Image (cartoon, grey):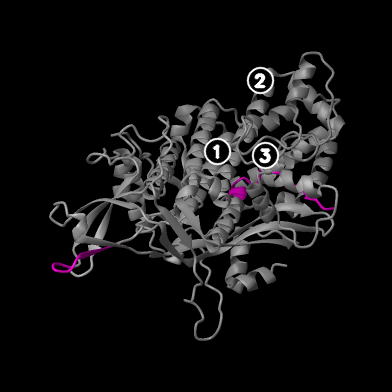
Amino acid sequence: MPKILDPDPGQRAYDSEFLKLVANPPSPAGPELKPGWRKVPGMAVRTGEKYEVTLDLAPQVLRLDIPEDRGYGETRGPQEAPLFPSFSAADVDASSFAPAAALALKAKQFDDGLYASVELAADAGLGRFPAKKHLLLRLLQALAAESDRSAAAILTAAARLGGQQPQVTAEVTREAETLQQEFLADGLRSKPLGFYTWSEELSRIFQRDRMLQTETKEPAARALTAALSRDDELLRAYSAALSLSEKLTNPLAWSDLRELASALKGERTPRFPEHLSLFPPSRAHETDLIKKLYGDRPIPEGFHLADEMIKRIRAGTLDLKPSPASGWYDYQTYALEALVAPDRMPEGKHLKLDESYRKELDGLFKALLALTRETHVKQLEVPMAGAAGPPEKLVLHLFPGLTLEPLASYYLRRVHSYRFVRAVLEQAFGPEGLGQTRRLTAAGPLNLSLSTELRLMEALFYGAYLQSCEEIGMAPERDPSLGNSKGTSAEQALLGAWLASIRKDPDLGQDIRMMVPAFYDIGRKQIKVWAVLGVTTKPLTISYETRPAVVEIRGPDGKLVKPRDVEVEFHREYHRAAYFATAEIYVTRLLNRSEFRQHCDNYKTYKAIVSNLR
């Protein structure tokens, strides 16, 4: 059995029985059915006995819709559905039917913890990766005495925000203090958000690195470039830090100093472009779009960036598919495309989605994009824009029997996103370094190595993909690099075990309410934010648009039952599923997680929360 627990107990995020299954995935049980076939229970109407029905799902098409919820305010007029701070608080029984929100929120907590662990590991230096906190001081020392003073001032201000106290001249100190004061006065740049509020160390990293994103003018850039070109080891450390940012989040939105330093080193004359910084922010599809549409003109009333993205994704004019240069954020965003363009996904021909359900998938897209952006909030660019029995026949009741939302492509693309980031981290820190690191939470590190937990997240989402394919009769894509060597049922069993113990998973009890900046509107002098106000529950019905074919029926004794003796009735099933309440609104002041959650607690309902943010 592989060792999966760290000697230090850490925070326990998984049930002990589930951890045993992680260490020893089950082998396939029994012969596999013919592709596209599925065994489901049938309940006899009169006797209540259970029969086993084998179905051919090839002709099956399932219909999903969200009917009007009459569970609130029936006697006193319309009322808003209650908002819950977490999935667990919503009290949805995910063990019998798992909404996509359950896996998505598990992923959110994991992603935050992974990124937080990587930030600390990169800062201190892990394995082969050079310590970022030492890089700044070494670069400051490497600046020539006659260098432009502003270069040293930027480095000094950043280092002090990061908790270091470099020794510099009085002139540099004064300039650095001015830069630092200007930076701290601008909450859009300096206010730690997301998991960066977990600890003082993470908050310092946030502010230091945001300071290092400061646009650098040519004199300072020349001095920094010259210092990098004179020291090969320093240039390699600088390149390693930038490469990690590019792969952990996304390619950079502005120019950096790597090519300039290489040119100078090769005795070529460097040409300094506009929008240059020592550690630039990263681009994203949403920031590219807002700059393209309103980079130099006013933003009209009623414009919503997330809605515009959805419209363009459906029209095929916004392609989210990752490129060879993409980072983890692009892979995460690509997974969300499956939510707003389900008809283009392989599972589309097996599903008929009512407009009410499509609307909730749009909301899921917006919420998960906002939550994903919050994970990467420090590194992502925030652009400026805008300016019975005989003689009667036996009657069997059959139901679709879905155990999770049939969003197969979303689950599979999530698997690929974790495989991508695992390769990035192994390249940066080495497999040994990753095995020594643990995911962070607000309460401390977990009792599972990050390497093992990454593979667990791959397995959970791959299990969800395979399960979803099986339940809708879709042939899964086969990729030998994915999954467990013991067979595909291992991932499905792992998923089932996690869902069975989901009430014990503290990740699902974490408060998910937050706001994250999308862009700054110059004309209105306001920040457009994406906010997740909480979890709400809605009824979900799943019915047969087109019925499957009955292959065979076996009775409670296991014997075949003649089809002429049985009447099969197909029924719809009902679930209570969890979804997100989201908003895209203008604010004049950013709120961190704690402040925003207090605001939500004060105002309680969606309308009150939003109206009092304006």
Q: Amino acid at mark 1?
A: Val
Q: Is residue 542 above or below residue 68?
A: above
Residue assigned mark 2: 233
**Which residue corresponds to the image point at 69% horizontal and 31% vertical from the top-left?**
137
* Mark with earlier residue (3, 2): 3
Q: Is residue 505 left or right of residue 269?
A: left
What kind of element bears circle 2? helix
Any magenta on residue 63? no
Q: Are marks 3 and 2 in contact (CB under 8 Å)?
A: no
What kind of element bears circle 1? helix
User: Distance between the Cα atoms at labels 3 and 1?
Assistant: 20 Å
Q: Amino acid at mark 3?
A: Gln
Q: Is residue 235 visible?
A: yes
Q: Residues within 10 Å of mark 1 (few under 14, many from 20)?
A: many
Pinpoint residue 500: horizontal percent, then vertical percent.
33, 55
In this rendered view, identify the residue nearer to me: 489 or 239.
489
Q: Is residue 142 left or right of residue 20?
A: right
Q: Which mark is residue 535?
A: none
Q: Is residue 110 visible?
A: no
Any magenta on residue 385? yes
Q: Amino acid at mark 2?
A: Glu
Pinpoint residue 108: horizontal percent, then vertical percent.
52, 50
Q: Which mark is residue 118?
A: 1
Select label 3 or label 2 by which is in front: 2
Pinpoint residue 271: horizontal percent, then vertical percent.
84, 24
Residue assigned mark 3: 164
